[in-house]
Amino acid sequence: MIRLDNVYKSFPQRKNSKKVLKGLSFQADPGEVFCLLGANGSGKTTTLQTIATLLKPDSGQVYVNEMNVAEKGREVRSVLGFLTGEMRLAGSLTGREWLNFFGKLNKMKPDSLKAKISLLADHLEMEDFLDKPVDKLSTGMKQKISIAISQIHDPLVILFDEPTSGLDIMASRIVLDYIKQCRSEGKTIILCTHIMSEAEKLGDRIGILIDGKLAAQGTLDELLAESGESSLEDLFFKLSGREEQ
Ligand SMILES: Nc1ncnc2c1ncn2[C@@H]1O[C@H](COP(=O)(O)OP(=O)(O)OP(=O)(O)O)[C@@H](O)[C@H]1O
């Protein structure tokens, strides 16, 4: 479970401060994909970094599995998997070596680490390139390895920030299927995206993030019924104040 209660976050600037989150509240439950849909710069990554204990909110509370992240940072991080665009794999280590490194960092036992790597390699279809240096891999292959790293410790709560970024249609499908599988295992998932079709297909509930607040949230059917719009895209434009003429 993830819960945000009235979260505010701003970043200091030279003369004033940039307010990014302005009273953000929502909850994601186990076995659910909560999709945070927002334009570039709307605050999606800031929201995830706040949940992941990487940023401290100015005010408001964030809970992960009933733990207040401000008080239980270490415990929260141990149940959390965070796929972020910030992770740029490079160098001569192979994907398997990266996975082993992160598994050991998470104090996994050798047998369970080996089994988990082989399971992830199977689910994310990585066998063909897992033993090649990451420098020699395509963007999509590296993205799959980054996803595997975020999953190595079998987190109960998963934050996916634009997980299909840089992936072709085949690789995107594999990743989206993997997210569905995590949901069926009862994990709590937040998926940040600006891709409407991903939100429509995967979001059990969708929160539309505009100007640091949720302009609307609910199931796709609820959102469309309440707004009278015929598509998520139309609703998004309407809420953004950019209704097509
Ligand atoms: N460390 C920081 N210092 C100052 N401003 C920041 C910082 N991090 C983010 N911002 C600003 O906060 C706003 C929201 O950024 P954020 O990365 O959360 O948006 P986003 O919705 O994830 O965007 P994108 O889809 O482009 O990744 C942006 O205007 C960004 O410039």
Image: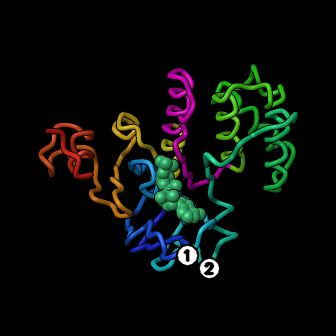
Callout 2: SS: loop
Viewer-side residue, 44 vs 18 = 18
The residue wearing badge 1 is 68
Viewer-side residue, 111 vs 194 = 194
Q: Is residue 9 visible?
A: yes
Image side of residue 195 versus residue 124, left or right: left
Q: Is residue 236 above or below residue 178?
A: below
Q: Residue at x 53, y 35 (%)?
A: 164
CA gap, disc 2 to disc 1? 6 Å
- The three-letter code of the residue at mark 2 reads Glu
Q: Residue at x 70, y 33 (%)?
A: 142
Q: Is residue 210 above or below residue 90?
A: below
| Residue 18 x %, y % | 47, 69
| Residue 105 x %, y % | 82, 55
The question of residue 186 being in magenta is answered with no
Q: Is residue 53 above or below residue 225?
A: below
